[in-house]
Image (cartoon, rainbow, N blue to C red):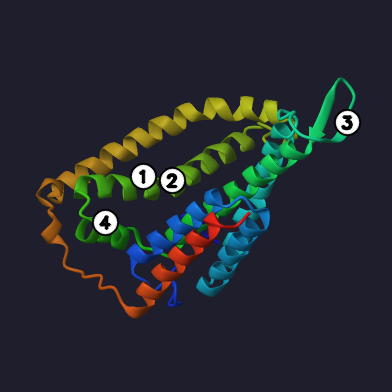
Amino acid sequence: MGGFLDYSPGDSFLHRLNPLAKIFLSLMLCVSCFATGSPIFCLMIILLNLGMASVAGISSRALAMLRTLIKFCAFLFFIQVFFIREGTILLSLPFNVYVTDKGFMFSLMMALRLIGATLPLALMLSITKMNDLSNVLVGRVGIPYKYAFSLTTAIRFIPVFTAEMAGIMEAQTARGVAFDTKNIFKKIGLIFPLCVPLLITSVRKIEGAAISAELRGFNCRKRESGYKSYPFRTADIGVSIFALILAAGAFFSF
């Protein structure tokens, strides 16, 4: 299984959609998560994301990311739930620490919104080629090529940097560094010094990529330079309408 942001080839319904329709769908799903006040609606969006991942053939990747998000959101939930002291007390603990109904609902919605807003963006990037995304942003949206290239290049480098970090950690593990410790603060202290070699490697890669882009006529690229067209078909219009209906329904769900 590739990284969360690596392109997963396929010929599913979602793969064949216009990249602009995929972007719009993912953005509307994110908006819906933050517009709704209903945890049930957020759960429906999360299940919808998992269903789309299954259609696209990346269900294992989506479930792996969901497990990671649940762990992170659970940590945020247990921190946040004790800071909101308004509302009716549901659970009283020693040292004047208690959980209220408003604190519980706020923390729950925060966790569900984070999961529901992260999954569609990762899904969209997993089934969209970066070249297609860059071309449609330039050709259809009218974003200058330099900005579209910067965005897609930053997305491309995330899996590269993740692999570089994994390689550095493996090399340090071979030297006896215990990264498998359960102490989160000790683990952060071990990982933090590795940011320096990762930064040096990143700068070298970015410099090489910049030289390659200059040699390929980066500054000569214009909106009309793209040879591939991205027409809007019936499926793209239908998905866009569905995304609008879903976002509109989020504003009225409580």
Residue of label 4? 137
Q: Is residue 47 above or below residue 104?
A: below
Q: Secondary structure at mark 4?
A: helix
Residue beneath the point at 23% across and 41% down: 210
Q: Position of residue 176 (x, y in %)?
A: 67, 32
Q: Nearer the viewer, residue 12 or 139?
A: 139
Label 4 and label 1: CA atoms lie apart by: 15 Å
Residue of label 1? 154
What is the residue that sits farthest to the front in this orientation?
252
Residue of label 2? 158
Label 4 neighbour load within 10 Å: few <14, some 14-19, many 20+ = many
Q: Quadrant of residue 147?
A: top left
Residue beneath the point at 68% across and 26% down: 185
Circles 4 and 1 in contact, beta carbons < 8 Å: no
Residue of label 3? 92
Q: Secondary structure at mark 2?
A: helix
The amino acid beneath tag 2 is: Ile
